[in-house]
Image (spheres, coloured by chain):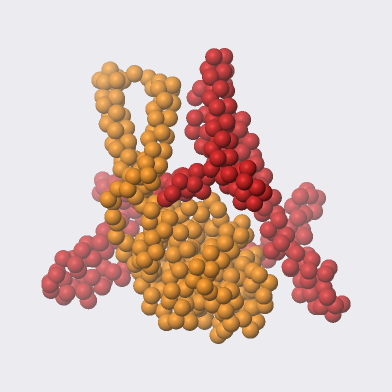
Amino acid sequence: MESPEQPPLRRTIESGVMIALLAAFLVVSVLRHNLFGGPAHVKDSIGVIVAAALTLVMYSFLYRDNPMFKSAENLYVGVALGYQAVITWRESLRPEIFDAIVAAPTPEAMREALIHRSVPILLGFLLLTRLSRKYSWLSRYTYALMIGWGAGLGIVLTIDTYILQQLEAAAKPLQDGMLSGGAAAFSWPWWCDAGAVAGAVAVLVGTVCVLFYFFFSVRHGKAGSAVSKVGIWFLMISFGASYGYTVMGRLSLLIGRVRFLMFEWLKTSP
Amino acid sequence: MGEKIDTRQLLVVRRIIYLLVALAVIVPYLVKLPLPFAPLEDSRKVFDRVEALPAGSHVLISMDFDPSAEAELRPMANALLAHCFQKGLIPVVMTNWNTGLTLVDGICKEAAGKAGKISGKDWVFLGFRPGFTDLIVNMGENLKGAFTQDYYGKSTQGMGALAGVASLKNIDLIVNVAAGSTVEAWIAYAADRHKIPFAAGTTAVMAPDMYPWLNSGQMAGLLGGLRGAADYELLVRQPGDAAKGMQVQSVSHVLLIVLIVAANIRFFVGRRPAKRGA
């Protein structure tokens, strides 16, 4: 990309443009949000103005990386981490540990809370031993329990959800369309059922060809290569669909920010 | 044509593209264009599933997202809640993302305020509990044990909105509005395990991965990205931010298609003389 060393004239022009944009932003914010209209206006508007400023600074990266963008980026990471810490304390640690044990209303309540919570708390603390080279082995007890619990619970459900039901679905439409629905394929309007059958055949061919493409144990001969190529085509179509959806998603985020800038910061009527 | 790529020229072209995309997003908000759209079949399936529930049914809506996905998922959550309130259903809202707590709280209060519904009686926001899959398993056994209080500190024992709900098995429909990998966990640990109807609303990036679940019937319907949200807004006859965004989306997509075609033409035309010279 561009060299960090910019010609002095260009640097001066860019600094001038930056100052002009900042001034324009402040003027627009003051005028649109009536900041001299009293403390109530300021209270309502300050969040919107800060958010608008940070949004514009973030988009300034599209022109070039710059110190303001870096500051906003670091601010974002810091605020997100701080927020997460506060929420974790408020929603997990305080009600589960502090309120239940330290701030328990009666000694009986505290004793009961200790009985129920001491083992989980101990296991939680053992995880922190990862920070010490000498005692990190203690964390394995917690991990062993977590992995054992997760595997025991997950294996049966995962096999059913991810494998058996998906296998059934891959085979079922073909069976339905060609056997039970086969008679209906010749009834009016026949193309509705024919479409379903064609779709099911495409899923079957796609599944087999893609799986064959990833089967590396045997050298693919001439016929095998042809099947693999069909598999690659199916994969490419699938990646294309994912890319299209990703573009749509990213545009939606841009639309969200533009909507915010236009209707909440600039207060234009929708 | 077969010249080396000029990075300075590329930078200028890139900035022009950014400018064009910005215009494609801003101008349609200012100029009304006749670009109608009809709801997709997958979105209609979610609507039909909610529509078929009798008044008083419990719909568990897990809003697993935070402000980074707000643009796509907030309109979806708004429309879903509006539909539930219109039908007299009881939304049981929760989140598995602690960074989304205040956002989800705002969504619930806004929708309930518009419909004149009361927290704890007509709807409940259970908040966040750590654990994710363990939490879902726990809710499958004892929902009020997993959430002893709602987000506002009211005890769930004896709460009107949760009358008759002992566990997930008493929930009539689960909808996961998600920006992450919670959908699979909801399917495996709740929907498939307890045979509860399940639908999802996801970000557009996640939507293609949802089709195997839809195809297998493990998911009753899908709202994919802003388009899914716009579909739902149309179906509940409350066009909002997402429906307005569709016009912008369409114009931007046309621009991107034109840019992709132009870039490909430029690529193939530029490649030919280099081949000859080789």
In the image, residue B94 lies at what x, y percent? 57, 68
Among the 4 quarters of the image, the one containing residue A88: bottom right
Residue A44 against residue B17 in the figure, above or below: below
Q: On the picture, is B141 further left or further right than A93?
A: left
Question: Which colour is chain A painted?
Answer: red
Quarter the C terminus of chain B occupies: top left
Above or below, B20 against B209 in this view is above
Residue sitting farthest toward the right: A107
Q: Colour of chain B?
A: orange
Relative depth, front residue between B195 and A225: B195
Residue A151 location (% of width, % of height): 58, 66
Q: Is residue B96 visible?
A: no
What percent of the width, then of the height, locates residue B35?
28, 51
Q: Is residue A268 above or below residue A182?
A: above
Residue located at (82% from left, 73% from top):
A104
User: How far across and down, in percent of the image, does residue A31 sit?
Assistant: 55, 40
A136 displayed left or right of A264: right
Q: Taking A7 as reference, is B115 above or below it?
A: below
